[in-house]
Amino acid sequence: MNWGNVEKILDKYTQYKHYQILHEKYKLPRKSSRDGMVKVLNEAVNDVGFLGPTIPEAALDEWLSLHQIDGNNYTFVYNLQEKIKDGLLHNIYENRNEYIKLKVWDINPDNESEDLTTVMPNLTEITLVGIHRNELNGTYTFSFVSPCEVTGSRIDGSSRLYKKIFFSHCVFFEHTNDVKIIFNPTSNLQNVNGVKKDRYDWTPIAAMFFNKVKEYIGEVYIIAPRWIPQALFEFAEEATSHNNPEITAASFNAQDKIADFASSILKDAGIDSDLVPALSNKLMQDIQISFESQLMEVYSSGEEQQVSFTIFKQRSDGVTHIISVESTEEGLAGHAAQAARRSRQDGDIDLLGVNLKQNDRLHKFLVEQGTEAYLIRGTNTFIEEEVVNIVIRRLNEYRNKIQVAAIGDSES
């Protein structure tokens, strides 16, 4: 192990929260600074003591290659037409040393030289540095490092290129057909392994890593996420539901009065609701939404859940309707919730801003439809991988319901 390289990599690429997760796992003392955490980590790895090091070399190797899977990352979720062949992933994992030719600590990340051919000369292409098995989650993770180029400044302020390490991960699930490509959207990026993103679209980068992992698992085919707009609709409807029996009862009891009221004001406008039922139904729906919204201002919501969702942003049909709120905790409420719900009735949702509250901690995501995968991305906050998995599992529940409903419709 090259501890000098380890310290340099930690200094350039590791956040304080990354240390917190590792220190909590091994019950190491926490310090108030990154430097303090590194010192504790150094002792845990290098102080052999009577019983050996607190963190074995193999455990540090795994953490180094895997720790960037948590953070302000983009997660592209692909859905395979068929599951990976039984035993293939396990076989690759058992023989992982045959596939891994480079350790993360073999890389010296110093990048001050403007001759980029001399910077990290052993990192010239996408390189596998780890294969991990998580029995609890039923996942296999392929971890890669790649050369990337970013723009920066010289001391005099002029622009130059720097070569950096780009961490990425490909995660396979044993029990679903999902595949995740995870990486951090590095600022001022010019290319990763020669591949550029398309303005703000990181799909080409994700596709490059998806194609790379096929070298290990063979050819696979994906299903385009055309179900995402309907799933986001269901997600938004449930997340903005009041879950309050008092509101449900009051709204139900008011249905006849709302119908009479809608018919009356249409009649006053010279419109026969019997001749134009679609208009009448739309008006009744809008009144019902407004009525429930007013009730929600008065009644409290249902019982608190360990994991709860609210919505802070909604985009329909690309740019047709964009509704968002500045609050990071309460999400869409009141008039904004009314407008969002009406918008959902009129157009497909292709982006949803989701607040996930778990054990009093708030996590903020954007979920967006793509052509080959859907994207879950944070909003400049550190998010652990397992929290993203909660969103994926919820979306899969909606997908399954949509697919079952589609089969039922085709058979009827």
Image: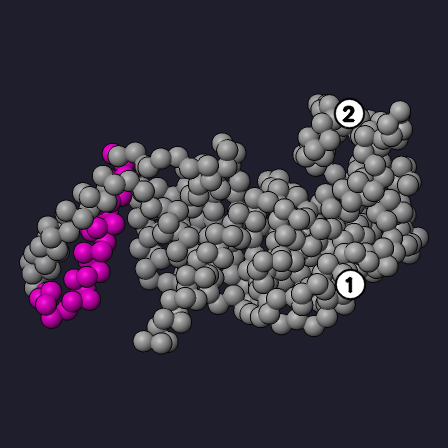
User: As shown in the figure, which amino acid type bears the numbered disc 2?
Assistant: Gly
Query: Residue 15: x, y in percent?
Result: 71, 36
Residue range of the region highlighted in magenta in the rendering: 271-298
Is residue 114 visible to the viewer in this orientation of the structure?
no
Point 73% across, 55% down: residue? 142
Mark 1 surroundings within 10 Å by alpha-carbon count, few (fewer than 14), some (14 through 19), many (20 or more)? few
Query: Residue 278: x, y in percent?
Result: 20, 66
Q: Return the residue at label 2.
A: 36
Q: Which residue appears farthest toward the bottom when viewing the image? A: 411
Q: Nearer the viewer, residue 150 or 79?
A: 79
Q: Return the residue at label 1.
A: 194
Q: Quadrant of residue 279?
A: bottom left
Q: Nearer the viewer, residue 395 or 154?
A: 395
Q: Quadrant of residue 169?
A: bottom right
Q: Quadrant of residue 218?
A: bottom right
Looking at the image, is mark 2 or mark 1 earlier in the sequence? 2
Instruction: Report the Cα–Cα distance between label 2 and label 1.
Output: 37 Å
Magenta stretch holds residue 289: yes
